[in-house]
Image (tube, rainbow, N blue to C red):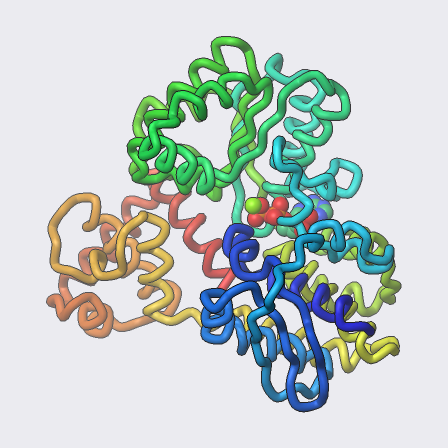
Amino acid sequence: MNKKNLWETVLAQVQLNVSPANFATWFKNTEIVSQDDEALVVSVPNSFVKEWLENKYQRNILRILHSAGLKVKKIDFTISKATPKTKEVNFSSLPLETEQLQLDVFKRNRKTGLNPRYAFENFVVGGFNELAHAAATAVSREPGQLYNPLFLYGSVGLGKTHLLQAIGNEVNKNFPEKETRYIPAERLTSEIITSIRNGTIEKIKKDYHAADVLIVDDVQFLAGKEKTQEEFFHIFNSLYQKNKQIILSSDRPPKSIPALAQRLRSRFEGGMIADISFPDLETRIAILKTKAQEKDLDITQEICEFLANNIQTNIRELEGALNRILLYQKIRNQHLDIDKIKALVKEFTVSSQGKITPKKIIQIVAEFYDLKENDIISPSRKREIVRPRQVAMYLLRTKLQSSYPFIARKFGGKDHTTAIYACRRVTEELNENEELKKNIDLIKMRFMNI
Ligand code: ADP
Ligand code: MG
């Protein structure tokens, strides 16, 4: 395997665990300069990136290399004199065999934000995503006519972005005259904030008002961003009134997004809401087979079943395991037997599926409700904090069987009767409060992904 291919495949692995924005920031214009048993030398564009990669990513990269059977001891990052300007072109001229590993962020169309890799043709449908898929295809045939907005939600790594992008690509194909725009909510937020600061907000607004199909991914990131919500509300209304299609995704339903203005929430709820749950075994196998075919990798039924049985709740991870096998086979130039694969996957799942600890629970609950961990363990009596705290206590009790005094200690040394009260309260309310039940289910889903 040559240096370029090796780096491509390593990056394909890294990419699975970092956000696209981060990935582009830190890994654009990097490449392997040389490689021997001792060290891998990687050139980077500047000292800022060098320092960051050394501190934050070095270990991860080493781990990927080691698990692929390479015995490199360290990675030296050096600053390249000339930034290779042709980098993006290089990606598209990669040999066919690694084509599927080409890096998403660099393939995005600058104007539409769409990546042609995501299509309906390579999206596997099963009971878990049937409704979302049906709604998505319908909307792509008649944008603006059927469900507006279309709101898809589901846990991480289950195909929301894939579906959203597939709609965009399909619309482009069927209606080339229509302006389609895909944007992650995080990027929309920073665009809006920057443009307000620079006085270019009118231009941005005009841009969005011109869209025929606007796709905003991961709108849970709008939580608490008041200014962005306000601007987005106006964009939304203007498009909606003109029968322009709006498509949104989130990791939870609109009513569970904290700090979302009521008027925006009711807009989000005004069209069609479809959820994506977890794929069953059969579908996981089908997905693996599709992916293996895409990557031109032959895997046996036995291996397929093994992977599908061991990675259940996240399609991205399923794909990650497959990439790992591919990487290994490439470097070693040999096929893997099932034992080797078991070992590889075990490491993969052990490193990504951490144990649930009290700290993790508090962290996940805080994140879910858009609070800081310290808020949850603080003695605050504010309503918006008391409920999440009760939920966290309840989860400690039910997930980890923690004792009440233990729970009380974890939450800033409260009296253990507070913990008893919290758990009882949540247990009772679960029977009658649909929203609470939904939220706790969603939080539990997140545990499956640690
Ligand atoms: P999400 O946006 O929900 O976090 P993604 O859309 O990024 O998830 O999906 C993660 C990975 O899994 C992507 O590579 C995507 O292509 C793949 N994937 C998800 N669902 C399916 C599916 N039903 N069929 C084929 N591939 C899928
Ligand atoms: Mg996504």
Q: Residue at x 60, y 68 (%)?
A: 80
Q: Residue at x 51, y 65 (%)?
A: 46
Left or right of 60 on screen, residue 296? right
- The residue nearer to you, when weighing 61 against 111, is 111
- Rendered position, 417 above or below 189: below
Q: Position of residue 116 (x, y in %)?
A: 73, 39
Q: Residue at x 56, y 54 (%)?
A: 24
Q: Residue at x 19, y 50 (%)?
A: 386
Occupied quadrant, residue 148: top right
Question: Which residue occupies the extreme front position in the image?
Answer: 81
Q: Position of residue 218 (x, y in %)?
A: 49, 40
Left or right of 440 on screen, residue 241? right
Q: Position of residue 31 (x, y in %)?
A: 67, 67
Occupied quadrant, residue 107: top right
Left or right of 181 on screen, residue 309? right
Regarding residue 352, the answer to whether it shows in the image is yes
**For the N terminus, which image quadrant?**
bottom right
Q: Position of residue 57 (x, y in %)?
A: 52, 71
Q: How many marks?
A: 0
Q: Quadrant of ligand 2?
A: top right
- The residue nearer to you, when weighing 448 against 58, is 58
Regarding residue 255, the answer to whether it shows in the image is no
Left or right of 183 on screen, residue 13? right
- Rendered position, 352 above or below 99: below
